[in-house]
Every structure is written in structure tokens, then in C-alpha cells.
Amino acid sequence: MSKFKDDSSITESLAARGVSRRDFIKFCSTMAAVLALPSSFVPKIVEALEKKMKPYVVWLEFQDCAGDTESMLRATKPTIAQLVLDIISLEYHETIMTPSGKNAEKSLMDVVKNQKGKYLTIVEGAIPLKDGGVYCTIGGRTALDIAKEVCGNAAATLNVGSCSSWGGIPSASPNPTGAVGVGEAVPGITYVNLPGCPMNVENVTATVVHYLTFGTLPALDDHHRPYFAHGKTIHDNCERRAHYDAGQFVRQWGDEGHRKGWCLYEMGCKGPMANFNCPSVRWNAATSWPVQGGHGCIACATDHNWDLASPFYKRLPKVPGFGIETTADKVGAGLAVVTAAGLAAHGIVRAIKGKPKEEEK
């Protein structure tokens, strides 16, 4: 699919398309920022990308809505053209590739056979296991069969979106097809989960850049998610956090608090349970993100959020940061008292910890 094959380095491909050295350095600086690396790592990323050949990449789609592909097509830093033509050599992607049918399958198998152990696989969509996996087939083969061969022979697999990470919407109760994430369907492979509904393409690009720079996947949490993207909660980075600490909540859509940008917690925002870097990376050319736009977070990057975080317009049963016995029903009055007393944010936690257990209860 790519104009330049693996004998072109990333910088050569960029230069051939008129991308300046300045823009290349800016791209490397952006990737360092997304990866939460200090600026001292920028020269290392520059050096790595100058020398590295573009990695072969195949993109598989299984039980999905193509939302992650749509997210990728809206990439801006770099653009989808730069990503596909300059950063990686995307050899197979059902949605955007030119070949079809047997020719398309040949493109996939050529990479699997000729680049064994060297290429990267990106998977979008869940894999059904029930009834032998018959609920998702491509070219007469089940998604499970394809994933075992393609992911099993890859250097690493990037599971993009919640469906490929842990099953997503297809796995929501009652999960009629037995849908699961790639890691569960194909155990033993090297993989990283980049959940979200959809995933944020900047996190995907940053993961690829990390792999090219350091030769490994980034540090992962116990859900196989990279810490740079999922190490902090939405709640901790939210621009509305000050309103939460001050007890200023939206009580009804369109009310004064909603118009003033107050906290959406009581309208069902799941930011306190969601680990994602939406507030810093944002969406649509980094112009905004759901909470900034006035809608609460639905914890789309959290495992099984469709079951565990719903209903999405009802608040969480407990309030993070205000003691394990404090419930959402006590938030309004409790926070008003806290604010009036001039306590620092989360000061109640420190006060509670110093009380005897009986008094705390």
C-alpha cells in the first residue's frame, strides 16, 4: 500500500514528500510529550527515526464498527497521509486498501510469511469464541483462526479500541457470540491494549514511535495499557476538577452550572474511575474532548464499561477522595461544608484517617 518500501527510512520518506526537518523535529517533540518523556529524550527519538526503516504493519478488523479506523483517518499529528506513507508501511487494511478478495489476502499473507517476527499487527474489533468463532469470518476463515496466525507471527500486536482490548460492545452482557479481546483469544502473544471508544490515534502513533525508538513496547499496567496514556484518571486531569472540589455540580442539563462549565459528576460522569489521557491529548485536532464539550465521561477505556459503568447518566455510588464511607448522596451538603470551612481539596480524607475506626464509621 505504501509508496515507499522497507528500503526507505522514515526521514527519507518524509523528505521525499516535502516534509521539512523542522516539522520532523516538531513531530518527535510531540511524540515525546504524548509518551510523557522529558525533552531530553527528543534527540533519542530523532536519532532512532532517522535510522529505522519503516515497520511493516497489517491492520485486522473483526467484530467492530470501524470507529477506530475512522479515528485514524482523522489523525492530524501526523496526518493519516504522513502516518501511512511516512511512519509505517501499511500493507493490509480492509477499509482503505486498494486490493480486494484474494489479492487482498495475498497482501496479508506475504507480510506474515516474508516478515515473520518483524512486522506489527494492529487489531480492531473483538474476537468471538462461541460455536468455534463462526460469528466473524473473513475469506472463509474465522477471526480466531486469522488472529492466531497473524498475531502469533508478529513482533507485537497493538489492540486498538475497547473491542479488541477486552471485548467492548460485542462482549456486553449477555455477550451472545462469546466475544473477547485479542489477549484472551490468543494467549501468549506480545501485545498492548489501546482501549477507548474509539481509540485516540496519537496514542497509537506514540506506541509505534516508542517501539521504534527503544525496541520495546512502553511500560504497561495490569490491563496491558500503556502508562503514558492510562496512568492517570480523567478526574485528576479534568479542567472541571476545581468545580468538583468546590462542590459546584451540574444538576440538570442546561442549568446555570452547565452553562458555566461546572463539574458533571452528578450527571453521571465516570471520570473518577476512568484512566485515559483525553484531557491532555484531546480529539479533533486537539480542539476538544467530551467533558469540555459538556458531556460526562463514560469510562470508554475501562474494561467492561458497558456493564460496570452504566447507566451512564447516573452518578457513581461512592465519591473518590472523600472517605470510603462517603456516598454520592452526601456529596452536595458535605462539599458545601468543606468549601465553607476553607479546607484544602481532599482535606476530609486526611481528617478521616486520623479518627478512630468506630467514629469514622
Image (cartoon, grey):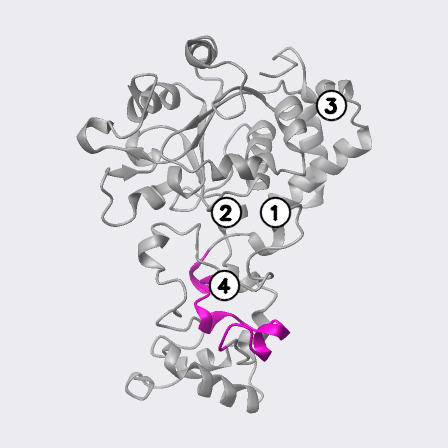
Q: Residues under labels 1 and 2: Cα distance?
A: 9 Å
| Residue annotated with mark 4 | 296
Check whether the beta carbons of the residues at disc 4 and disc 2 lie within 8 A of each other.
no
User: Looking at this view, is 133 or 338 the one in front?
Assistant: 133
| Residue annotated with mark 1 | 36
| Dot 2: element | helix
Q: Nearer the viewer, mark 4 or mark 2?
A: 4
| Dot 1: element | loop
Amino acid on which the number 1 mark rests in the picture: Ala
Q: Which residue is drawn at the image coordinates 44% and 52% (left, top)?
A: 300
Check whether the beta carbons of the residues at disc 1 and disc 2 lie within 8 A of each other.
yes
Q: Earlier in the sequence, mark 4 or mark 2?
A: 2
Amino acid on which the number 4 mark rests in the picture: Gly
Check whether the beta carbons of the residues at disc 1 and disc 3 lie within 8 A of each other.
no
Q: Earlier in the sequence, mark 1 or mark 3?
A: 3
Q: Residues under labels 4 and 2: Cα distance?
A: 23 Å
Disc number for residue 14: 3
Residue 293 in picture, x, y percent from top left:
59, 61
| Dot 4: element | loop
Amino acid on which the number 2 mark rests in the picture: Tyr
Check whether the beta carbons of the residues at disc 3 and disc 4 lie within 8 A of each other.
no
Disc number for residue 227: 2
Q: Residues under labels 1 and 3: Cα distance?
A: 24 Å
